[in-house]
Image (cartoon, helix red, strand yellow):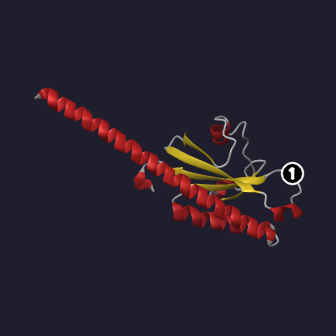
């Protein structure tokens, strides 16, 4: 009888672990989908505002759109970055104007060190207080952009979106 109970406990433990892992994967995938949607909306908002005349007000507007979208999808932070790593708009006021270095900033090294070079890219990292999912998408250079931005690059910057992976209750 003890052997049957032991087998039953082992089977239930394995099933519980499998179900837990499956829920975690589904939770992370849901965040990736939200990040892709938010990235497209922020990039679209930025493009529309830039093509309408640009200026400093563009970045305030994009920061406001980012705050609204972060709240709507449960993101902990959104960063809109220039190609050189400068924070142009963010939901985190302490990072306004900061310039990230992909070589020396730990936040950048997590993706770049893992060989992430295609967009969108996603990485799970531990920030000391918990696990975060960061999804980074490109701000594509649209045909209308070339009237002001004549550089030959395919994208103008990046949008980084962080989600807390504490579990489905955090969503």
Quarter of the image for residue 104 reads: top right
Image x and y of residue 65, in percent: 64, 67
- The number of discs equals 1
Along the line of sight, which residue is nearer the eye, 168 or 143? 143
Horizontal and vertical percent position of residue 161: 60, 53
Q: In the visual, does 158 lie left or right of 74?
A: right
Q: Where is residue 45 shown, x and y percent of the image?
A: 70, 67
Q: Is residue 97 visible?
A: no
Report the side of 5 relative to 165 (left or right). left
Q: Is residue 137 visible?
A: yes
Residue underneath mark 1: 152
Identify the image quadrant of the N terminus: top left
The residue carrying pointer 1 sits among few (fewer than 14), some (14 to 19) or many (20 or more) residues within 10 Å by Cα, namely few
Residue 90: percent from the left, percent from the top?
A: 66, 58
**Residue 42 image-quadrant placement:** bottom right
Check the image and report above or below for 111 versus 62: above
The answer to which quarter of the image holds residue 13 is top left
Q: Residue furthest left?
A: 1
Q: Residue at x 16, y 32 (%)?
A: 5
Question: Outermost residue, top direction?
Answer: 3
Asked whether, in this view, residue 6 is left or right of residue 132, the answer is left
What's the residue at 64%, 38% (across, down)? 106
Q: Nearer the viewer, residue 111 or 100?
A: 111
**Farthest bottom residue in view:** 52
As displayed, is residue 8 above or below residue 132? above
**Residue 75 located left or right of residue 81:** left
SS at circle 1: loop
């Amino acid at each position: 009888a003890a052997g049957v109970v032991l087998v039953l406990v082992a089977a239930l433990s394995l099933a519980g672990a499998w179900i837990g892992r499956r829920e975690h994967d589904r939770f992370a995938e849901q965040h990736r989908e939200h990040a892709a949607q938010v990235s497209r909306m922020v990039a679209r908002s930025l493009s529309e505002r830039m093509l309408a005349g640009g200026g400093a007000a563009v970045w305030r507007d994009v920061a406001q759109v980012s705050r609204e979208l972060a709240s709507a999808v449960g993101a902990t932070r959104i960063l809109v970055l220039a190609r050189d790593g400068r924070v142009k708009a963010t939901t985190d006021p302490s990072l306004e104007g900061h310039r990230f270095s992909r070589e020396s900033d730990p936040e950048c090294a997590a993706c770049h060190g893992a060989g992430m070079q295609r967009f969108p890219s996603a990485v799970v990292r531990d920030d000391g207080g918990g696990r975060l999912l960061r999804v980074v998408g490109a701000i594509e250079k649209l045909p209308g952009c070339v009237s002001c931005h004549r550089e030959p690059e395919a994208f103008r910057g990046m949008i980084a979106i962080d989600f807390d992976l504490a579990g489905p209750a955090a969503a």
